[in-house]
Amino acid sequence: MFSGKTVLVTGGASGIGEAAALRFAQEGATVVVADLNVTGAEKVASAIIAAGGKAAAIAVDIASEQSNADLFAECADRFGGLDAAFLNAGILDAWGPFENYQMASFDRMLNVNLRGTFMGLKAAMPVLRPGGAAVVTASLAGLLGLPAAIGYSASKHALLGIVKSLAEPYARHGLRVNAVCPGSVLTPMVGVTDALPLVDPDALDAPVYRGSLAPQHIAEVALFLASRRAAGINGLAVPVDAAFTADFGDAN
Ligand code: NAD
């Protein structure tokens, strides 16, 4: 699906980004694994190369405009541009009631998840080749309120405003911008630090229920949105939530 193409994944050292990096590589892409955790990014790039794929690791702090600019300038220099950018890095650092919510946490959420991804898109769009696509990782908390993580939810809601605002103007340049909105995924972000079966050929055959999504479930949808098979999809927020929002849940 991505043979001869170059794809960048931010947050590629862990969880959803790591699973996506491995899957893009399996589909033939040269993968740029970008992360604040450069050691983790190098491990993922090495695993891809050991499996016969092509990858490079680059350090980035998405919260820095200069770091975003440097990352995409390096992609332009080394690879002549990108065919897809999966802007997936994000953080969740506060869990608790609104009354106790610290403004420092609110600022961190908006700084990394919203401002960081905005700056990433700003640097990425000029580097995408015609026919290319940006995919950002928002969240189900970008579609529904999450009272226990209100700053996180606000950052992801606002991110969808950016995605929707960019879609039509960039369509004129042959580019697409979409968001994937995961439900609850078993990654280090939610405290799951056991070795995960990040890319498991059988994972997609197993039943999946609400809070038990695997990183690969999200990665597969990101791959689709980044591919030409999704050429008709632009400006959309795609939930991947295993029926979380389908009904009244436990109240049923
Ligand atoms: P994770 O913690 O496993 O991975 C996040 C990665 O982002 C890490 O490798 C981390 O080093 C990197 N990162 C953090 N801040 C960064 C920065 N400033 N610059 C560059 N890299 C940075 O988490 P995950 O669950 O894989 O999360 C990936 C994305 O999915 C995030 O945007 C998150 O908000 C979103 N998401 C996760 C869930 C979930 O349940 N896990 C649900 C919805 C959305």
Image (cartoon, rainbow, N blue to C red):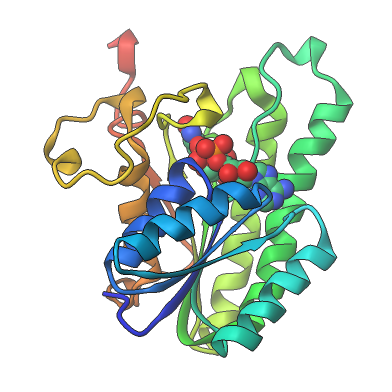
Q: Nearer the viewer, residue 183 or 194?
A: 194
Relative placement, left or right, of 27 versus 136 is left
Percent x, y for residue 60? 70, 59
**Residue at screen point 58% across, 62% down:** 163
Q: Quadrant of the N terminus?
A: bottom left
Q: Nearer the viewer, residue 105 or 245?
A: 105
Percent x, y for residue 217? 30, 44
Outermost right residue? 103
Q: How many marks?
A: 0
Q: Quadrant of residue 189?
A: top right
Q: Is residue 29 visible?
A: yes
Q: Is residue 139 visible?
A: no
**Residue at screen point 46% across, 40% down:** 15
**Residue at screen point 63% across, 17% down:** 148
Q: Quadrant of residue 28?
A: bottom left
Q: Is residue 235 above or below residue 117?
A: below
Q: Quadrant of the C terminus?
A: top left
Q: Is residue 162 above or below residue 197?
A: below
Q: Is residue 179 above or below residue 128?
A: above
Ligand 1: give its quadrant. Answer: top right
Q: Nearer the viewer, residue 111 or 168?
A: 111
Relative placement, left or right, of 103 versus 61 is right
Relative placement, left or right, of 186 versus 230 is right
Q: Nearer the viewer, residue 56 or 81?
A: 56
Percent x, y for residue 52? 30, 68
Percent x, y for residue 226? 40, 69
**Residue at screen point 80% across, 37% down:** 108
